[in-house]
Amino acid sequence: MNPAPTPEPDAPRDLVGIGIGPVNLSLAALAHPLDGLDTVFYDQRPAFGWHPGLLLEGATIQVPFLADLVSLADPTSPWTFLNYLRSRERLFPFYFAERFHIQRAEYDAYCRWVCENLPGLHFGHQVDAVRWNPERDVFEVDYTQLDTDGEAEALGRTYTRNIVLGIGTEPYVPDPLKPLVEAPGVPVVHAADYLDHRATLLAAEHVTVVGIGQSGAEIFLDLLRNRPAGREKLHWLGRTEAFAPMEYSKLGLEHFTPDHTRYFHALPESTRDRLVEGQWQLHKGIDAATIAAVHDELYRRTLHGGWPDAVLTPGVRVRTAGRVATTKVELHLEHTLQDSRSRLTTDAVVLATGYRERPLDRILAGLDPYMRRDNQERPRIDEDHRLVLDPSVTGTVYVQNAETHTHGVGAPDLGLAAWRSAIILNSLTGSEAYALPGRTAFTTFGLTQRRHVPPPREAPALTPLVDDRR
């Protein structure tokens, strides 16, 4: 690979990435060896961090280690998880550990290793605006360079022919609980910040966990294991009607394949919306091993008689909430199936209420006149993960992990990150930079199954590079 020289200040790049989470990091890693491709990636955070508040000891990611940044598109890449282990002289320990699902903290460390060694990643750069310049046929990307304290240090602008958005998700807080999270006093924290408040939560007399997905289960289990037997004083509740296991059968997992993604994208918009709502157990349930661990811990506490002071109630929603004498929180609860209501007074609340896609409108306000939207006013996104824009815009905006409404439940799944990055790079270069499989599932989704068709090999002109090595 020929290294790309530093471009002229006003020379347009081939691709600017906004956000450096796992999905854009995957794209950057797969773009790295492609000759003649000039890329740069920005993130406002000072360094990479993957859900740092949930890096609980022993917690594992819910996809196999092969779902790293690159392997499912290019297992020979230098940026594989196995090569990370090799660089740390840990291949043999990993081999004997026989772990198919690695710890969450180890996945975070692997991504940090890639960030430390991969060029073209700029942390501490907050992208402020994106505009289309019709006179130059390029996008203008305005950013603010931040210092170590997060304060503005300098302003800058980059020009690019293409953009890829990988701005990820943000913690979701239900409306009745937003005033409590934003006010000081009794700890009401989102699960994303759990480790920062863990000591305070363990010291609280009574703790309530709201949300019965994977994060809620892990946090409830951590609290349970670290509170005295008989005096646990824990409540765990959520809207889902059962403490349901995540679908993890082999054919069930084929919903996270390119075959299903293509099938889903071709469905009518209204059908896609109904389908996503009904597929919650594919990605919002609890890992069966975690459910077993919770039950084992509860059972262990009955060995000497009595029951643990822990209440687990599914099918419950929080109607309203408020503070009581500044030292407690009162939750007004409703059991929807039973049509009953009650109040719960607690000393601390952890909101394991999940995440939502960050709205693209915030960062793409300057492109709003060019964007095409669906019946729900969401951005239209084509099969190759491109925003559908007015034909007058000759550049392309690619989208990662913000297209569940068009690409289905696999959109945020780490197992599809490398495949999606390869699709984007093949589209960007107009060539088969990465050979992708035509079929990926035994399941035939629909009466006809759409196959992958490689792009034409004629690549568009990229930024001309000069090999100035001596």
Image: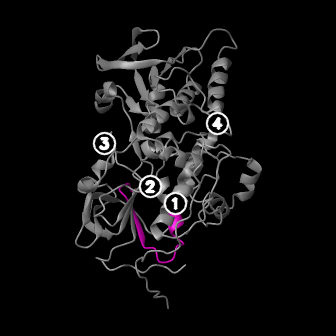
Residue occupying the far front of the picture: 447
The amino acid sitting under disc 3 is: Glu
Which residue is tagged 4? Answer: 248
Residue occupying the far bottom of the picture: 470
Q: Position of residue 470 (x, y in %)?
A: 50, 91
Mark 2 to mark 1 CA distance (whole Å): 8 Å
**Does 124 appear in magenta?**
no
Mark 3 to mark 2 CA distance (whole Å): 17 Å
The magenta-colored residue range is 28-48
The amino acid sitting under disc 4 is: Tyr
Q: Position of residue 72 (x, y in %)?
A: 62, 57
Q: Which mark is residue 385?
A: 2
> In front: mark 1 or mark 4?
1
- Which colour style is shown? one colour
Instruction: Tell me if 179 is positioned left or right of 18 in this view.
Output: left
In terms of secondary structure, where does tag 4 sit? loop
Which residue is tagged 3? Answer: 377
Q: Which mark is residue 293?
A: none
The amino acid sitting under disc 2 is: His
- Label located before the other in sequence (1 or 4): 4
- Do the CB atoms of the residues marked 2 and 1 lie less than 8 Å apart? yes
Mark 1 to mark 3 CA distance (whole Å): 26 Å
Which residue is tagged 1? Answer: 423
Q: Position of residue 170 (x, y in %)?
A: 39, 42
Mark 4 to mark 2 CA distance (whole Å): 26 Å
Q: How many marks?
A: 4
- Label located before the other in sequence (2 or 1): 2
- Write the residue at 50% across / 40% down: 54
